[in-house]
Image (cartoon, grey):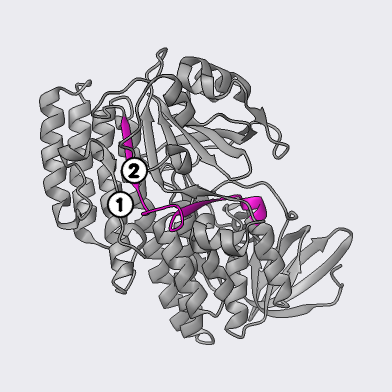
Amino acid sequence: MLETSKKQYDILIAGAGFAGSITALILHNLGLKVCLIEKGQHPRFAIGESSTPVADLILRNLATKYNLPWLHDFSRYGTWQQSHPEIICGIKRGFSFYKHSPGKKFVTSEGHINELLVAASSDDIQSDTNWLRADLDAFLVNKVKEYGIDYFDLTEIVSAKKNAKWDFYVNHLNSHSIMEVAYYIDATGSGDLLEKLLGIKSSSADFLTNSFSIFSHFNHLPTWSGILQKENIPSDDYPYNPDNSALHHVLDEGWIWMLRFNNNLTSFGFVLEDSNALYDNIETEIIWEEKLKKYPSVNNLMTEATLAEKPGKILRSKRLQRKLNNCFGSGWVALPHSIGFIDPLFSSGIAHSLAGIEKVINCISENWGDERKLDQNMKEYENAVFEELKLADCLIAGCYKSMPYFELFNIWSMLYFTATIAHEQRRIKKQEPGYFLNADDLAIREIVKLSYADLIKILENAPPTAEEINRFTRIIKERIQPYNIAGLLEPSSKNMYLHTVAKI
């Protein structure tokens, strides 16, 4: 229980998800006195479960640079299973996309006209992972405690006042306490606390993307490969089993994620485009049932599935797109998942959070004690996060606009994989990582901007013609050529890409 007397710390971190805990552990190892505050209690349900090669690269870098050797094990499926098989995760070999048409069973062709599989690893051992966040987040909090870092759960930050230092007023059950800290890091995953404490506003304006999600965890969800087999749809030339991936079912009005864990649990959710506020007054369960009935092959997946004990119901998000007006200020900074979010389409959340931790820790470690230099460096961090969100927004908005026309979606999505590959290569070559998704690469930003304008022009008279599709393919292939080490858009690939990142 918290004491009523004032406690003193160098840094207070709010939010004990994986980002808050990892940040606390690193700062502790740098010799700073840290406390971590959590409004809830672990283990707790959370989504944001899919890692990527960039996330793995950053985890390994943080583990080595800041003396957290055990963290390295969570960067690959093989080492995770060897070291901590009790912490549930799943194999994520890459990204899989299947296009469904309303009222029809899933169909495709020998050339995989309605499929796209992009491998991100060479085998299961080297694979990325789907994180069961309840397990991993709880494990990291236990590590925080092991390291002797002060951790307070079921604790609410009521208010904060800054003079030379911060005074944070907190409640824990029926006790009250004041914490005097030099610096505050928001890792809560939303802008709510910063608005409450400091009046920092969040906005959903100025985004191209407009989506929300309805989701839960399920037991006994049949495998998609099993559905394909029943429908006599061959998968012999697949680069991996699609159930061991971030599996996307692409709809006309959005998409579905399926992330499978190795304990028979599956994360399943719809993400729906909602620019015209079509769903505002419709109950969540009605939307859920209507979407399942609209797409028969998806509905077949759910016939035997049962809701998992946690969360035990279908959940619904607000609009996903949001951004704080400021990322930092005098004596405080927010991590990327608190600053803003676009959409989970390409599983960028974990990697973006880790990239933010990397930048924030570097700023603090190099400039601690010099407020002017610290603020200068945090301003660059703010610029980076805003540019990263802007680039991701354009890339994902293009996906939503092209979802009804899978050939167009396929072509457009190559821009995202191009940005990702470029950023992976930068890190693999031990270059300065710069901005996430290479958002500081002016050439990539210009490619995306020009291509988005081209896409909008094609869609003015939708559906696109074969001539427009072919021309767009040629344009995108030419634009991404300097970065394209994976043979993206090569006709011989038949939408099956074997490995888009070098062995790491």
* Residue tagged 1: 499
Reply yes or no: does residue 362 show up in magenta. no
Return the x and y of residue 329 as percentages of the image width and height: 51, 69
Name the front one of labels 1 and 2: 2
The quadrant in which the C terminus is found is bottom left
| Residue 239: mark in rendering | 2
Residue at 59% of width from left, 18% of height from top?
Answer: 286
Of residues 234 and 330, the one drawn nearer to the viewer in this rendering: 234
Residue toward you, 329 or 68: 68
Give the Cα distance between marks 1 and 2.
8 Å
* Nearer-N-terminus badge (1/2): 2
Q: What residue type is labelled 2?
A: Pro
Query: Label 1: how many residues lie within 10 Å, few (<14), some (14-19) or many (20+)?
Result: some
- Residue 281 visible at all: no
Q: Evaluate if marks 1 and 2 touch, with contact meaning CB atoms under 8 Å apart.
A: yes
**Residue at horizontal 14%, vertical 35%?**
472
Image quadrant in which the N terminus is located: bottom right
Which span of residues is magenta-colored?
115-135
Q: In which quarter of the image is residue 419?
A: bottom left
Q: Which amino acid does label 1 sit on?
A: His
In screen coordinates, is 52 left or right of 12? Answer: left
The spot of residue 207 in percent (x, y) is: 39, 43
Q: Does the magenta stretch include residue 134?
A: yes
Residue 359 shows in the view: yes
Give the farthest residue toward the right.
Answer: 174
Q: Residue at x 50, y 49 (%)?
A: 91
